[in-house]
Image: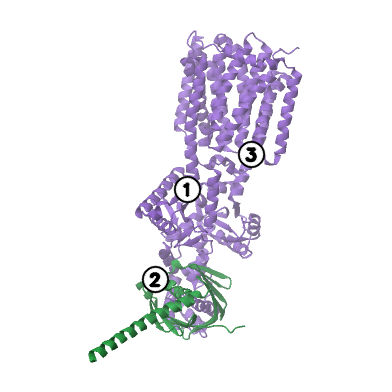
Amino acid sequence: MMPRVAGVLSRVAGLLLLAALGGASGDLDQVMALLAQRQHGRVEFIEQQFLAVLKRPVESSGELRYDAPDRLEKRTLLPKKETLELAGGILTTQRGARRRVLDLHRYPQILPLVESIRATLAGDRAALERVFRIEFAGSVERWSLTLEPLDQELLRTVKQVQIDGSRDQLHRIEIRQADGDRSLMTLRTPAAP
Amino acid sequence: MNRQRTRAAALWVCCVALASIVVARAHYITDLSAFLPAHPTPTQQLLVDQLRDGPASRLILAAIDQGERSARARVSMAMARRLRADPQFASVNNGEPVSAQRDREFLFRHRYLLSDRVTAAHFSADGLHAAIADSIEELASPAGLLLKSLLPTDPTGEMLHILDELERMPQPATADGIWVSPSGTRALLVAQTAAGGSDTDAQESAIKAIRAAFIAALSESPDSGTKALQLKLSGPGVFAVDARAKIERAAVRLSIVSGILVVTLLFAVYRSATALALGLAPVASGAVIGVAAVALGFGAVHGITLGFGITLIGESVDYSIYFFVQSHATAAQSWQRAWWPTIRLGMLTSVVGFASLLPSGFPGLAQLGLYSISGLVAAALVTRFVLPALLPRGFVIHDVAPLGARVAGLLRPVRRTSGRAIAAFAVALAGAALVVLLRHQGTLWNRELAALSPISAADQDFDAKLRADLGAADVRELVVVSGPTLESALELAEHAATALAVLVDAKVIGAFDSPANYLPSMATQKARRDSLPDARQLRANIRQASADLGLNEAVLQPFFADVESARQAPLIGAQDLQGTSLGTGFDALIMHQKNRWNAILPLHAAAGAQAVDTARVRAALQEAQLTAAQALDLKQESDGLYAGYLTEAIRMSLTGVLAIIVLLLVALRSPLRVARVMAPLLLAVLAVAAGLALSGVQLTILHLVGMLLIVAVGSNYALFFDRQASVHEPGGESLTLASLVIANASTVIAFGLLSFSQIPVLVALGATVAPGAFLALLFAAVLARTEPPRA
């Protein structure tokens, strides 16, 4: 009897474990699928940067726009107007009259920062996995994605990117740098007009 | 008599030997200077220098086409790596940030000498506050990650400012980390040779090195992606090398083919190897003496003069033909009496025509004038004095009188036609040609220098496309300032930059480059260094500035140390730039000649504009009282130069025709006879010009030279008919006709072949002279009077 019960239990446990594991992987895929379905997005953001060189955090706020699959625009409204546009691996920044164009291929240090957000918004798991080791926690309704650069060189600047969200919405992006500086971006869907 | 003959032959051998020595030791130039004025104005001199050795002349543009995108990038990088190690190249740029590390170190170390923001005000409490606040804001952008480590040493952001300023020049598109065309289908690479563009040998060797690097890069990664790759090169050096090879090939091939044809023709006529060999003596002597005369007269011979030299064969070979054919019936002495005066007049006519080219400001044309004059005189004199001496006793060539009789037979219907009808026909033909020319008046002449270029339109289009892709590398408009020292040139460049910056803001021009961007003048560097506050003052200013910025003052220790050491550091000179890409940028924009230093500021058109408004640039420079600054549009200037030559050449040719008429009036002493001699020549020129216009050909300076040749060669024909009409000797007409037909056939063969070459210059000559010479003979024959004038 006992061995049979134990056998059944262990088999059930095994099934449960499988289900749990399958569920986690399935949830990531489901979140990615949900994200991939979105063609456009527009959210408001507040960003705080905690830097060792400064006594207090730098705060900025504005709007993030996204068009599938690779166009990302960050419009900072406060404290100073600045736009930042990512399209096809080219980052263009505009502050006042000054316009800068950065080819991200030339700045591999920045690439993961931008790519973490872009690939997540695009629901492009393969792209994420090319640069990061992914850890998924939570459920489709409330998920948390922890990204760690695979490249040792990159790890020396960026330690970790954590993105929290629910379904196809991103709520919070935290970037931790290797030297202890970090930035925190909170996102909010603007109230329907 | 015999002694006199021997003396003539000996003199001839001596002259030819001496001329051969001169020819062998002469200096030959193949660069563009044949097209540039002998006594240039300062602007023209600048243009000449720019075209010969300026930065634009040293660029080789390479495009890697076809194949796969990643393969193109891989090959571009492998090629660039190889070429960068080659001392033939001053720089090789394919968009990779290779020298970036060294450049950044240099810029960072000297940032307080290089940044134009460094002033006393910038380092005051207020200035520091503004600059640091700006830097802190920059930290918020993604690039902030890169800037963060800079903040403690460079809180005012000078490094970023310098980089921004350097990147203001338009940059090509990039993909996979290298330059590509906007559509991404071509990888682009720009090599700047160390040697000037006028050094065609060096350019050729550089081109070979690039091709070799491409092949080597392909073999490094042989896969399906690289197999289809193609390398295409363009640029002034590539064109020069290509043109030289084409002209050399064409000259050799055409000389051989036309040589064979003319020799065959002459052999068929003379049926005597002796006559053939003797017949070439005047031609060869003329060519050697012509080149020697140019070498002595001008110090150096332009390659293009030799190219034109073929033209000489056309006329000088005629002399020996006249001699052999016409002396057939008589002894050499009676030929000298009966025919030589006519040949002499024909030669003088040609000499007068070509003499009109001598004062030309276009060295190529002036040399052609001297070459033709000396060559023709030599050939005629050899025919007159040496050939009779060399002729074996009792020598005769095959009798050609039957040929002349047959031609006379062909002319018989014409001879039966009334003079009035023929005159009416001539007038009608001239009128029709004039109508055609007037209709095409606006487009008759091509005033662009490119019309003379041996480069095909397709190659020129490809070049323009590559330049558009590269944006930055296209240098067409530029401002040049010059001073007696490097320092003064740099100071003037800085002064000009102030004026040009206003135009950039007004969007008149898009951007400009300046050597002072890479190396500011000593005066500017010193002013910047002097404006840095001492350690105590700097700390006080920073304390005041950072009060409300939330900046951790303690992190700024490296900044204090750097400013203090910048205050003590020596100024930088040109030698400090060595080994950085800034050094290459600087070298390309500074030219040192004898006691002048030229600083070149290339201008880039404003976004959306095709070209720079040079007039507004000039006005701005004048307003800034930069009288020593010159704004140049390279294409416009060179076209202007050429258009000037063309106008000058047209005027000179007309003068030449007038001079010929005067000469004939003096020699023939009869306006009517002069009119009879000139009419067929002018008619032939008009008909050829109209024919070219009708077939859509725009006339260039070479067509004009061709027309002068029609008159030169044709005047012999017309004069022989004139002679025939006045002496009216028995059997004379058929001898005249035979010699003229043979002479004409050799001319038409030699020039007809030219029109089959791929060199526009040669095609222009061939297409003008071949039909023109034929028409001149035809018209001269038709218009000739066979009856002696009834006095």
- Residue visible at 56% across and 14% down? B325
User: How packed is label 1: few (under 14 Cα within 10 Å), some, or many (20 or more)?
Assistant: many
- Residue visible at 48% across and 77% down? A34
Say whether mark 1 and mark 3 are on the same chain: yes
Q: Is residue B606 above or below residue B219?
A: below
- The secondary structure type at the circle numbered 3 is loop
- Residue A130's mark? 2
Task: Specify whether B630 is left or right of A18.
Answer: right
- The secondary structure type at the circle numbered 2 is helix
Q: Are marks 2 and 3 in contact (CB under 8 Å)?
A: no
In purple, which chain? B
Task: Specify whether B544 is left or right of B98.
Answer: right
List x then y, in percent, for residue A181.
42, 81
Residue located beneath label 3 in the image? B698
Residue located beneath label 1 in the image? B196
Q: Amino acid at mark 3?
A: Gln
List x then y, in percent, for residue B169.
53, 61
Q: Amino acid at mark 1?
A: Gly
Q: Cα distance, mark 3 to mark 1?
A: 32 Å
- Front-lying residue, B535 or B319: B319
Q: Cα distance, mark 2 to mark 3?
A: 62 Å
Q: Cα distance, mark 1 to mark 2?
A: 48 Å
